[in-house]
């Protein structure tokens, strides 16, 4: 089956309150009632002038951003991007390019698309904030499936010190159900790309399977791992990830109630979602949405509920992160070829009160 590329729809603001109804087993199904609130006022514009940005990471408290199509990493200096370095071998095509980044022990980790695969590289961050450069790249994982669609691409370090990566099915849905294939998975590895001894499958980096195109990773204060996932034509998902669990794709999209598959905590219509980056900030899980052009806030104490903010006011939202001061930063993505850029786009903005 050929998987269609999802194009940006026209969002329609409905004047109503969000009401997510429980749908068997405590997993909610989206109803037609949606919040009309634009949410809290924006406290600060942190940066403008970004080009197809994808991910934010912090090094010693200072923000770094990956730019998908240029294959470069920038730092924010006086509200503007300053180039830290360009990563060799990035092949920007469709949804691929320079995607997720993470920082650990003075090194920058990056998930990128090449002409032949997706891979993860590790580079030393040199210099102080405002004058950083990238040292030579060392590849820690190769051979991840790549295509113009469904590359996954989010990487993050968990509270266990391991590196987690979301890998899309790259347009080959059956790979998601094949435990030997790396497509359609969430992977777990050491910072050098090795398999941790306590991974759920012997001799494998696979942590969970049955994913179509997961793009968000975040941990709650209790260590619970959450992931956001693009569905196909019907349902996008928020999942609670358990080691070794199967999340259904392509056998199930959204809530399926089928033995052997784990249903999502929440599902949303694809026209109102396309969830990418997620973050735990305070007592809430925040979800940035691309096609839906909104931020969802989900209380960790009530994961079957949600409220919405910023509908259409910022455009496409690619990432949301918890900044070192505890605030929430939102990364827009209107210059990626599917949005309607405004003057100053793309930008980072900070939520007031978070």
Image: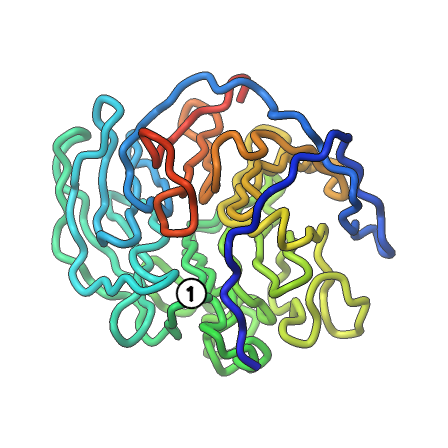
Q: Position of residue 149 (x, y in %)?
A: 43, 67
Q: Residues within 10 Å of mark 1 (few under 14, many from 20)?
A: many
Q: Which residue is mark 1?
A: 151
- Mark 1 element type: loop
Which quadrant, please, contains the N terminus? bottom right
Q: Position of residue 134 (x, y in %)?
A: 15, 47
The residue drawn where x is 36% and y is 63% is: 94
Depth order, front residue of 184/335: 335
Quick check: 88 above or below 289? below
> Is 313 situated above or below 151?
above
Which residue is at the front of the view, 54 or 2? 2
Q: Is residue 143 above or below residue 17?
A: below
- Asked whether, in this view, residue 102 is left or right of residue 210, the answer is left
**Farthest-out residue, right:** 24
Residue drawn at point x = 42 percent, y = 51 percent: 338
Q: Quadrant for residue 304, please give it.
A: top right
Q: How many marks?
A: 1
The residue closer to the viewer here, 147 or 352, is 147
Q: Position of residue 151 (x, y in %)?
A: 42, 65
In the rendered image, residue 11, in percent from the top left (x then y), is placed at 60, 42
Q: Quadrant of residue 293?
A: top right
């Amino acid at each position: 089956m050929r998987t269609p590329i999802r194009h940006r729809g026209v969002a329609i603001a409905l004047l109503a309150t969000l009401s997510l109804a429980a749908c068997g087993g405590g997993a909610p199904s989206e109803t037609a009632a949606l919040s009309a609130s634009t949410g809290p006022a924006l406290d600060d514009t942190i940066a403008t002038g970004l080009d197809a940005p994808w991910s934010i990471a912090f090094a010693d408290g200072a923000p770094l951003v990956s730019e998908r199509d240029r294959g470069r990493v920038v730092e924010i200096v006086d509200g503007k991007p300053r180039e830290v370095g360009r990563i060799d071998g990035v092949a920007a095509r469709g949804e691929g390019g320079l995607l997720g980044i993470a920082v650990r022990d003075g090194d920058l980790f990056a998930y990128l698309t090449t002409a032949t695969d997706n891979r993860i590289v590790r580079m030393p961050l040199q210099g102080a904030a405002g004058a950083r450069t990238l040292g030579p790249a060392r590849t820690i994982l190769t051979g991840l499936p790549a295509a113009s669609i469904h590359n996954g691409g989010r990487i993050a370090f968990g509270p266990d010190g391991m590196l987690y990566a979301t890998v899309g099915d790259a347009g080959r849905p059956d790979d998601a159900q094949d435990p030997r294939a790396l497509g359609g998975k969430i992977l777990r590895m050491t910072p050098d790309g090795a398999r941790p001894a306590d991974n759920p499958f012997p001799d494998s980096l696979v942590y969970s399977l049955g994913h179509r195109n997961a793009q968000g990773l975040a941990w709650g204060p209790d260590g619970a791992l959450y992931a956001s996932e693009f569905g196909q034509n019907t349902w996008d998902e928020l999942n609670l990830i358990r080691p070794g669990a199967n999340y259904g794709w392509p056998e199930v999209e959204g809530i399926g109630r089928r033995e052997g598959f784990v249903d999502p905590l929440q599902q949303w219509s694809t026209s109102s979602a396309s969830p990418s980056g997620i973050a735990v900030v305070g007592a809430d899980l925040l979800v940035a949405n691309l096609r839906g052009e909104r931020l969802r806030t989900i209380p960790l104490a009530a994961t079957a509920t949600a409220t919405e903010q910023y509908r259409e006011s910022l455009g496409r939202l690619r990432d949301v992160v918890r900044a070192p001061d505890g605030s929430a930063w939102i990364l827009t993505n209107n210059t990626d070829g599917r949005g309607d850029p405004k003057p100053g786009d793309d930008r980072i903005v900070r939520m007031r009160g978070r």
